[in-house]
Image (cartoon, grey):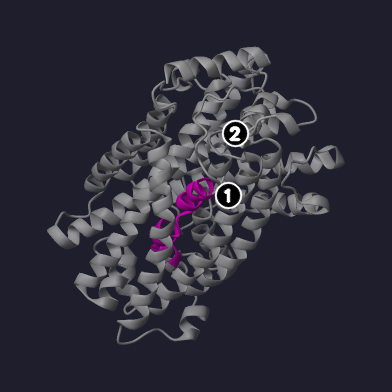
């Protein structure tokens, strides 16, 4: 046989996708590094760590932030390991909800339906949280530089502009997105080194080690330090989300059964190390703790930068953070749109025919991109009336995503030795890892539904439970009244010949 006749890795990927029931509609051009880059960019330590840093300063302070990070990290690694093993068996853009359908011993359609809706609201919330954080930081910079006041109205306007830009960038195709994600990895890593390096060298004084590693601050109104420390874990848990993107991008990734799982795990590990360095460096550089918490910009890290390094250098550090957050938001829209595309492909979203539509020129789900951006905008709008909206959005993201993450891991545990392992697997450790991961997610599900501030008022109320009741209550009602009669889980698009015909048509149109 001639060398040119040998099956390529892309052919093997397409063959596996056919086995899972789908045609190769999306363009498979992403490398393993690009797949990792998407998840690493969405985790974005320069987004999650810094946008919730002010929350952490009041909810446990330095001790909760510095020690909460590795504590949460251990359990996040276990969740990621469980997901990676399943991803290797089922490398498809549907990801979590597809896995749930295939692993459930019975009622697979119901498991798939609710996993998908948890994933959908979690992804929209995390996109809203990321780009809202970028808008907050950008508004703080514009306030410092040009006097553009940091008001809710201005922040929401900036958010709308950012989401439009991210929608437009994703419309141009996966190659451009992959290029930006590759740049983003180095922007994040070098950005952390620059920020921490400057904060070590420039300030005349630094906080003591006892302050950084042992100072506990409670401005929540609650009396229990254990409860407050637990609430403070939101900073780490929210930052370490979004790595399911590696699964959602597998239909566009070469050697997906190995590259997808590695993307999940490597993005978590690199983020854990770099994020801890960032938190420690920033906390050592605090000059005026109360002044940073009460900063007029509403962005404590910006005030810390300026107090420690001066106005000019501080604003330059702030720009590094804004750049990282913009990269992060763009990647989040990418991953969110792929999940919407896959869920719509199986008829699970109102108007599925619209959201599943592929742009023939770029072979990307353009309509799903704009639904992702529009949904994020709607979720962030309550900030115009309530300053606690951002904390609620981050809680929704954590709860929604992690429940979706752990359902297939839990089902894999129930599957036991009957689980069909992929080329990347945990061997005998699959079940114990899955059990611990499931227990952890059950704990944080309850924790991040609880009140974060006392006394509880209209302005301080944690709206996460209400948001979930509305969305998931609607999904449950829809399931009972209608969807259970027609939604049978992930659809098989056709026979081998029919899948090949779909792919040939795309080639001719392209």
Residue at mark 2: 10
Q: Residue at x 55, y 27 (%)?
A: 342
* SS label for mark 2: helix
Report whether 421 appears left or right of 114.
right
Chain part drawn in magenta = 33-56
Q: Quadrant of the C terminus?
A: top left
Residue 23 picture quarter: top right
Of residues 456 and 423, the one nearer the viewer is 423
- Residue 294 visible, this angle: yes
Mark 1 residue element? helix
| Tag nearer the camera, 2 or 1 | 2
Whether tag 2 and tag 1 are in contact, CB under 8 A, the answer is no
Label 2 neighbourhood size at 10 Å, few (<14), some (14-19), many (20+)?
Answer: some
Compared across the picture, whether 4 is left or right of 433 comes to left
488 is within the stretch colored magenta: no
Q: Which mark is residue 263?
A: 1
Please name the residue shown 61% across and 54% down the image.
265
- Indicate the quadrant where residue 76 lies: bottom right
Q: Residue at x 45, y 70 (%)?
A: 279
Q: Nearer the viewer, residue 410 or 41?
A: 41
At 61% across and 40% down in the image, what residue appears?
Answer: 256
- Asked whether 57 or 104 is in front, the reply is 104
Residue 107 lies left or right of residue 256; in this view the side is right
């Amino acid at each position: 046989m001639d060398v040119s006749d040998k099956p390529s890795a892309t052919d093997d990927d397409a063959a596996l996708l056919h086995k899972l029931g789908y045609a190769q509609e999306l363009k498979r051009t992403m490398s393993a590094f690009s797949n990792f880059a998407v998840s690493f960019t969405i985790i974005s330590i320069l987004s999650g760590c810094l946008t919730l840093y002010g929350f952490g300063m009041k909810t446990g302070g330095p001790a909760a932030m510095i020690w909460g990070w590795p504590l949460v990290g251990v359990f996040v690694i276990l969740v990621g390991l469980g997901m990676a093993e399943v991803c290797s068996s089922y490398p498809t853009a549907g990801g979590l909800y597809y896995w749930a359908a295939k692993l459930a011993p019975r009622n697979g359609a119901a498991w798939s339906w609710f996993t998908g809706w948890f994933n959908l609201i979690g992804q929209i919330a995390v996109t809203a949280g990321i780009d809202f954080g970028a808008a907050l930081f950008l508004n703080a910079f514009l306030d410092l530089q040009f006097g553009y006041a940091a008001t809710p109205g201005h922040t929401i306007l900036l958010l709308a502009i950012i989401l439009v830009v991210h929608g437009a960038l994703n419309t141009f195709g996966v190659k451009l997105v992959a290029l930006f994600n590759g740049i983003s990895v180095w922007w994040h890593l070098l950005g952390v080194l620059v920020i921490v390096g400057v904060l070590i060298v420039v300030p005349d004084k630094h906080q003591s080690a006892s302050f950084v590693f042992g100072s506990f601050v409670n401005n929540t109104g609650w009396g229990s330090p254990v409860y407050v420390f637990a609430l403070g874990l939101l900073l780490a848990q929210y930052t370490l989300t979004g790595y399911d993107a590696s699964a959602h991008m597998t239909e566009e990734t070469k050697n997906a059964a190995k590259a997808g799982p590695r993307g999940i795990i490597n993005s978590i590990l690199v983020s854990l190390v770099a994020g801890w360095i960032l938190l420690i460096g920033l906390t050592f550089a605090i000059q005026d703790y109360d002044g940073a918490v009460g900063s007029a910009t509403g962005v404590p890290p910006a005030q810390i930068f300026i107090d420690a390094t001066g106005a000019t250098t501080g604003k330059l550090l702030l720009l590094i953070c804004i750049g990282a957050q913009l990269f992060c938001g763009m990647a989040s829209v990418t991953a969110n749109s792929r999940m919407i595309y896959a869920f719509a492909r199986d008829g699970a979203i109102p108007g599925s025919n619209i959201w599943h539509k592929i742009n023939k020129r770029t072979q990307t789900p353009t309509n799903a991109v704009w639904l992702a951006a529009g949904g994020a905008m709607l979720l962030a709008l309550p900030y115009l009336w309530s300053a606690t909206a951002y904390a609620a959005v981050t809680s929704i993201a954590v709860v929604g995503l992690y429940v979706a993450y752990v359902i297939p891991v839990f089902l894999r545990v129930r599957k036991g030795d009957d689980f069909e392992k992929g080329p990347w697997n945990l061997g005998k450790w699959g079940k114990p890892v899955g059990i611990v991961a499931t227990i952890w997610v059950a704990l944080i599900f309850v924790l991040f539904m609880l009140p974060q501030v006392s006394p509880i008022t209209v302005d301080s109320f944690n709206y996460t439970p209400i948001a979930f009741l509305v969305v998931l209550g609607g999904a449950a009602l829809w399931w009972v009244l209608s969807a259970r009669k027609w939604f049978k889980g992930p659809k098989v698009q056709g026979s081998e010949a029919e899948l090949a015909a779909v792919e040939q048509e795309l080639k001719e149109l392209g």
